[in-house]
Every structure is written in structure tokens, then in C-alpha cells.
Image (spheres, grey):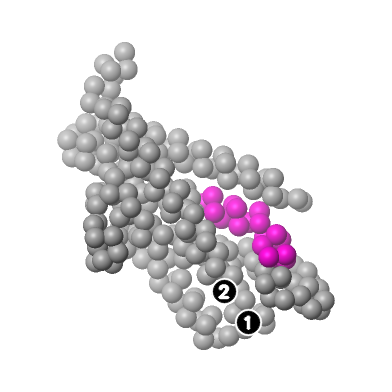
Amino acid sequence: MIENLLPNVDWEKMWEASLETLYMSAMATGFTFVIGLALGILLFLTSPHQLWANKIVYWLTGAFVNIFRSIPFIILIILLIPFTKFLLDTIRGANAALPALIIGAAPFYARMVLIALREIDKGVIEAARSMGAKTSTIIWKVLLPESLPALLSGLTVTAVALVGYTAMAGIIGAGGLGNLAFLDGFQRSREDVTIVSTILILIIVFMIQWIGDTFTSKADKR
């Protein structure tokens, strides 16, 4: 019955493409979390009236974040082709999509980290400083625990966006469901392949959203 409704769908290819999408999304989300968190903390600490207040570092970091989060992802992929070629010696496959995915998402997440940190009650930070706490202690014992629900919520939003980015990366041969939908579906006028690929992407997005919401709710002690 399913074969009659979806005559052009190769389920083995669909499964392989789904795994590639999950791989790209998971790897990019992991690196984005680490890099974006570091950039966000640096932006917060070097902003006016904070522990490492420094106009030059704050401006340079902010400029880097603003530039790369403002470039449309499809253009960013093209701009980074020489860098990707140099780094991985190829521009095709799931791994080749990772540099563009990370560079495109990390600055976006960094801004969300900055917003989360700015929402922390200043009195809590000042209390830690008055007790002589080191900057590292303030980061690990105050900033991160106090902003954890917002950080997880922001990471969920970023991970969902990354799934969409992987679909765009598929257009230039990065693999995944986007690549399958474009090459086997759109270019060959196989609507069933495109529809199934889209449904699988939606399922992945819903799964990520559910997992993210679950962890955010558990982290929120209010």
C-alpha cells in the first residue's frame, strides 16, 4: 500500500539521509553550544560595568558576532567554500557542512547567551563579588546556574534552526534530507520524495523541541 502511494521513495536512502541530518545537527549543535557560550560570556564580561569591562574587546567580539549572524546562511556556505576546502580537502558530504553550520549558528547563540546573562539579578553577582569570589567561580557558580533555563531554551531554538540550515546545505551536496529532497525530489519531479523528506525533517524538529522543552522545564526552579 505504501509502495503504491510513494513509488519513488527509496527507504534505505531516506534512512541514510535522516542519519546524516541528525549527525550534522548534533555535531553542529555541540560545537555551537561551546563556541557560542564562550562568545556570549566574553561579551557579557567585557561589557560596561562588568568584571572584565573592555571597550575594545567588547566591540571586536560584538562586531564578529553581528557580522556572521547577519549573513544569510546560503551565502555564508558559498563564502566559506575555500575555507572548507582548505580545512577538509572537500566541499561535499556531511562533514563539509559543519564549518558553515557552526560559524553560522555560534554567533546567533552567542547573542542569546548574552541576553540570558543580562537577565540575571545584578544583586546576585554583586553579592558574589563582595564575598571575594574569583571570576571563574562567578561564571560556574553564579552566571551559568542562574541562566541555565534561558541557555537551554536558546540552545533548543538554535538546534531547530540548525536542522533548517542542514537542509539548505544539502543543496550544495552536503548530504542529508535537504540534499535528497532537492536532488531526488525536486530536480527529478518526484513529489513523494520531497514530501517524505519534509515530513522527516519536521519529525526531527518536533523531537528536538520536545527534548529541549523537557530539559528547560527541569532546569527552571521557579
Name the magenta segment's main secondary structure.
Answer: helix
155 or 199, which lies in front?
155
Q: Position of residue 12 (x, y in %)?
A: 30, 29
Mark identifier at residue 110: none
Label 1 secondary element: loop
17 or 208, which lies in front?
17
Q: Which residue is mark 2?
A: 42
Q: Is residue 172 above or below residue 184?
A: below
Q: Is residue 179 above or below residue 80?
A: above
Q: Quadrant of the N terminus?
A: top left
Task: State the separation of the CA atoms marked 1 and 2.
Answer: 8 Å
Q: Is residue 164 above or below residue 85?
A: above
Q: Amino acid at mark 1?
A: Trp
Magenta segment = 140-157
Mark identifier at residue 52: 1
In the image: residue 196, left or right of residue 127? left
Label 2 environment density (alpha carbons within 10 Å; few <14, some 14–19, many ≥20): some
State if disc 2 and disc 1 touch (CB < 8 Å).
yes
Label 2 secondary element: helix
Please tell me which residue is depicted at 68% across the width and 65% down the height of the picture.
Answer: 140
Please tell me which residue is depicted at 71% across the width and 61% down the height of the picture.
Answer: 146
Asked whether residue 155 is drawn in magenta, I would say: yes
Q: Position of residue 44 (x, y in %)?
A: 60, 73
Q: Position of residue 167 (x, y in %)?
A: 34, 46
In the image: residue 214, left or right of residue 179? right
